Amino acid sequence: MKRHLEINFRGRPRGLAVMQFAVRAAHKSGLAGYVKRLPTGTVHIEAEGEEENLKRFLKACQERPEWAGERDEFSVSDKLIGYEKFYIRKQG
């Protein structure tokens, strides 16, 4: 069953490095969605895919490099947006 996952990294994440890490991990896990840096500096991720793939992605995010900052929160839901690919979304 497809699910929707949202993750926020706060603290002092290195924005571009975290976003590139998220794109690689999402592609490796077969997910669609996006990652973007919010005006507050928080890095926000939305990903969709099969539950097992989301678990693999979440695990990669939990085992993230130290430069990624703290994983502040995450939530999983059944609300699907219908993303077709995973990409870096521009701020704004």
Image (spheres, rainbow, N blue to C red):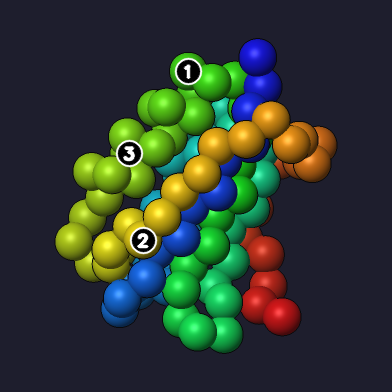
Q: Is residue 28 left or right of residue 60?
A: right
Around disc 1, counting alpha carbons within 10 Å, would you say few (fewer than 14), some (14 to 19), or many (20 or more)? few
Q: Quadrant of residue 37?
A: bottom right
**What is the secondary structure assignment of the residue under circle 2?**
strand
Who's the residue at 28% across and 67% down the image? 69
Report the mark closest to the observer, 3 or 2: 2
Around disc 3, counting alpha carbons within 10 Å, would you say few (fewer than 14), some (14 to 19), or many (20 or more)? some
User: What quarter of the picture does the C terminus occupy?
Assistant: bottom right
Who's the residue at 69% across and 30% down the image? 78
Q: Is residue 63 above or below residue 13?
A: above
Who's the residue at 74% across and 36% down the image? 79
**What is the secondary structure assignment of the residue under circle 3?**
helix
The disc label shown at residue 60, or none: 3
At label 1, the amino acid type is: Glu
At label 3, the amino acid type is: Ala
The disc label shown at residue 52, or none: 1
Query: Which residue in the protein does label 2 denote?
Result: 72
Who's the residue at 65% across and 14% down the image? 1
Label 1 or label 2, whichever comes before in sequence order: 1
Around disc 2, counting alpha carbons within 10 Å, would you say few (fewer than 14), some (14 to 19), or many (20 or more)? few
Residue closest to the eye, 25 or 82: 82
- Residue 77 spot, x, y in % from top left: 62, 35
The furthest residue to the left? 66
**Mark 1 → mark 3, Cα distance in angstroms:** 13 Å
- Residue 10 spot, x, y in % from top left: 37, 71
